[in-house]
Amino acid sequence: MTLLLDTIPYARFLGLRSEQDGDVLTVTMPFADHLVGNPMLPALHGGSTAALLELTAVAQVALVWPRLRLPRPITVTTAYLRSGKPRDVHARARISRAGRRVAHVLAEAWQEDPAQPIASLTAHFSMDEHDS
Amino acid sequence: MSDTFLTTLMPQLASGAAHTHALGFVYEGVNGDRVRLRTPWRPDLVGDPQTDVFAGGLVTAMLDHVGGLAVWTKLGRYEPIATLDLRIDYMRPARPRVDLLSEARCYRATRTIGFVRAWAFEDDPADPVAAAQATYVISSDGGRGAGANLKPREDRA
């Protein structure tokens, strides 16, 4: 699965790495200066964390439900729960439902403690091979 | 709103941080309460190498950021803000190898929360790639004094 993320330019831009344990992926975004959105705090840009969550969701869906095309987002909602510190972020996604056309995914991102997530994502992805 | 705010501070806020600079955001200016940001297309920001289309994460980052700019535009000054919640609907694929524009408007700001709508499109806001609804926490309580924005906030760090 590291292979899939390695083929996505934006995942490489963010520096994402992943580990697979059975069917579960854990994706890590190692801290890097170019992820910072607020140099005063400093804090990660919300866009970095949201993109990590979205790509984790994409990779998890593609792992469990492989298709010719990557899942494409229909609606994505990100809740920002805590400020992202200048450290590594980890993320994991859970597929609530995967149908022929649509998959629903929940994902969370955390730093030190998985019980203290910094952001959560809920999203629907299109699994359709034929839409444009 | 002062000219300095629009001509000096807003471009800084638009692309002055490391992440926004790395993504190549370009400040396109303010028109009334609407603010625009452009991301020139780049191959390293693609989400699916089969299509050469911008990654969803790039669209998210740009809409998150342009929404924050809209809050500052509404306030007419800089205050520390943080995104609370961001929902994005993807209406259609972006066109491959084309710059993406975004526009946002803060249609309501209370003392603590800014409510924003934003769109991403290639050339016509009426034909959006994606639309966002977002809320931002405004930390105006401690942010009014000169230089207050330069101090790290212990409770959030």
Image (cartoon, rainbow, N blue to C red):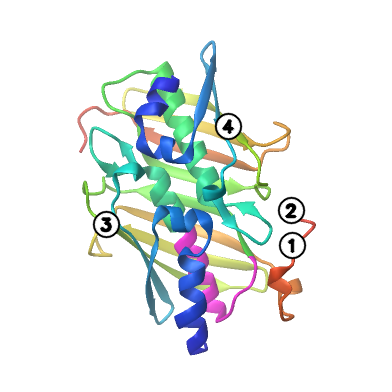
Instruction: Specify whether residue A19 is painted magenta.
Output: no
**Magenta stretch, residue numbers:** B64-80
Give how far across and how far down residue B33 sits, in percent.
Answer: 44, 78
Asked if residue B151 is positioned above or below residue B62 in the image, the reply reads below
Labels 3 & 1 near each other (Cβ < 8 A):
no
Q: Is residue B68 magenta?
A: yes
Mark 4 lies on residue: A91
The residue at which mark 3 appears reads as B99
Chain of the residue that carries numbered disc 3 in the rendered image: B
> Which quarter of the image is occupied by the N terminus of chain A?
top left
- Chain of the residue under label 1: B
Q: Amino acid at mark 1?
A: Pro
Q: CA distance from mark 3 to mark 4?
A: 29 Å
> Which amino acid type is marked by label 4?
Ala
Image x and y of residue B32, in percent:
40, 82
Residue B34 picture quarter: bottom left
> Which mark is in front, 3 or 4?
3
Whether labels 2 and 3 share one chain: yes
State the residue at coordinates (47%, 67%): B14
Q: CA distance from mark 2 to mark 4?
A: 20 Å
Asked if one can make out residue B140 in the rendered structure from this viewpoint, the answer is no
Question: What amino acid type is highlighted by mark number 3?
Answer: Asp
Q: Which residue is mark 2?
A: B157
Please tell me whether mark 3 sits on a helix, a strand or a loop.
loop
| Mark with earlier residue (2, 1) | 1
